[in-house]
Image (cartoon, rainbow, N blue to C red):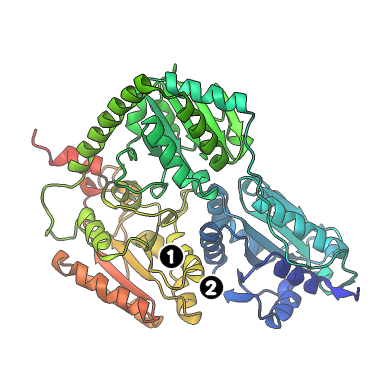
Amino acid sequence: MNKISGARAVVECLKSEGVKYVFGIAGDSLIPILEVLADTPEIRYISVRHEQVATHMADGYARHTGKPSVVLVTRASGASNTVLGVVTAYSSDSPVVVIAGLPPVQSMGRGEYQDFDLVSLFKPITKFSYQVECASKIPYILHRAFRIALHGRPGPVFIGIPSNFLSEEIEPPFSFERRHGTWTASCPPQEVIEEIADMLLKSDNPAILAGNGVNLSKANEELRILAETLAAPVIPEYCQLDLLPTAHPLFIHDHKLLSDIDLLFTVGTNIPDFYMWTEVPKDAKIIQVELDAVQLCKVRPADIGVTADPKAVLNAIKDSLTRKIDDEIRNRLKRRYERIKGLKEHLLSERWPKGEWNATPIRPWRLLRDLRETLGPDAILTHDSGSLSTYWLSRCFDFYNPKTCYCCLGGVMGFALPGALGIKLAEPDRDVVALVGDGSFMMVNSALTTSVQYDIPILIIINDNSSYMQIKWRQKPPYLGSDLLNPDFVKLAESFGVYAERVEDPRNLKQAIVRCLNETRNGRTALLDVLTVSDPRYATPETYFKTSRPS
């Protein structure tokens, strides 16, 4: 084989992994890679104005497609700016590969400009953090990094490459042919499956706690069938609102249901919600089916813990249950199904407030209802960690299909806008909407110029309540630090070349959404600034219904 530069080796590795997009900001330590990318039509380079935006875009693309996405950054300042995005990707099982150009190896440890220990910085928030020791190892390390990012429970990796290696000539150690990630459709021994099925049938009041692993293994249909076979409610983990259709009788968005169970079956979870586990009775049996052994027994000891592909395990359990269910059990399960269905109908009957639909400033439920009625069932929604997204969305917004709801599972503000851009690259023919708070939007509004520059038309809806409402509702007056002074978002957006409107009257809301969607369908990004109520009593359904009921 002819010798190639380290930079060429990097790009050839990306091509062999099927990488279509690289997100980043140009830096002096990256110039050799950028010059090779400029002559590589198979990979599109997306330049952003902040590395957090690059990482969120990569995360959105990787999460939606299940394919690896690459962030290319420079030295310490550029790499450290990706931390919030990497935390989000790590919390969201997203195979984002961060590649950083480092100072020349001969100057490391001698006070070189921006010479910091980035490997240690990224180690706690990635599956793999590594610095390449010599140019000849670039292909090996990158190939390994992609395998780690994709294998088992996906997640981000960090690779640092000293800049002098990029100009060195190396002999490729193997051919750069297209490579594919591996997925092991493993399943535990049949006796374990039978034991799980027996425990589920003996339970009087089981519940299923389902997480992102269901989407990762494309096990949504298997989850639905198992829940219906067992007549067990499915409770989604935080923000996993699209695992089943919202209207499904067994899909219950209320963790308080866990307080009465005698068995909890978890599948594909991260189990970050300690408040959920405080609801689970101490004597309840626990069965876990997870992609990663790290998740087993993380919060509570499990009676049975399985590390395997959720799709394969759910299928096997369903088959075992079907063989074991006789007429007596079937009648018992039917009664349980009707009871849970009645509970779901009751919850749906109380989901909407009785009044204030035309009140100004606009109420959260009016915004969500009008948005849902305007969007098609296949539209994709990204949202941030504000009170509207965290609380009202799960109560007042229906999802119909898997992989149509994405949020920042790490609690980071700023994912929704750039995340939507990454998803739109993967889904150019679908409506993609970023529902953002005014606080989150101001952190990443430079993404507007990326949207315009690279023709990535999405709809951004700002929940403009002039506050960090997620914090404000927990405070007492004067709400120190939580009230915001906002710019004119319409003028700001228009200065980027974005179509923009502002809505203050709820009666004008739906038509404004329609106009903005039409702009995006014609290839232009649109922004809708919705003036919403800033009173903390409206922050969550709990605070609203508590204060609006007569004493």
- Quarter of the view holding residue 304: top right
Is label 2 or label 1 in front? 1
Residue located beneath label 2 in the image: 49
List x then y, in percent, for residue 142: 75, 60
The quarter of the rendered structure image containing the C terminus is top left
Mark 2 lies on a secondary structure that is loop
Q: Earlier in the sequence, mark 2 or mark 1?
A: 2
| Mark 2: amino acid | Arg
Residue 407: mark: none
- Taking 10 as reference, is 159 above or below it? above
Residue 99 falls left or right of residue 407: right
Q: Nearer the viewer, residue 172 or 75?
A: 172
Q: Can residue 534 be seen in this snapshot?
A: no
Q: Is residue 58 left or right of residue 240?
A: right
Most foreground residue, 208 or 224: 224
Residue 282 in percent (x, y) is at 44, 18
295 left or right of 165 in image: left
Which residue reaches farthest top? 283
In this orientation, which residue lies closer to the viewer: 360 or 432?
Answer: 432
The residue at the far left in this view is 550
Q: What residue lies at 13% left-to-right and 56% top-to-bottom?
A: 357
Can you tell which quarter of the image residue 273 is in?
top left
Residue 27 lies left or right of residue 139; in this view the side is: left
In percent of the image, x 22 and y 53: which residue is there?
A: 365
Work out which quarter of the rendered image holds the N terminus and state it: bottom right
Residue 10 lies, in percent from the top left, at: 76, 68
Residue at the disc numbered 1: 417
Q: CA distance from mark 2 to mark 1?
A: 14 Å
Tag 2–tag 1 contact (CB < 8 Å): no
Q: Secondary structure at mark 1?
A: helix
Sort mark 1 into few (<14), some (14-19) or many (20+) by Cα contacts within 10 Å.
many
Q: Residue 105, image x and y in percent? A: 84, 63
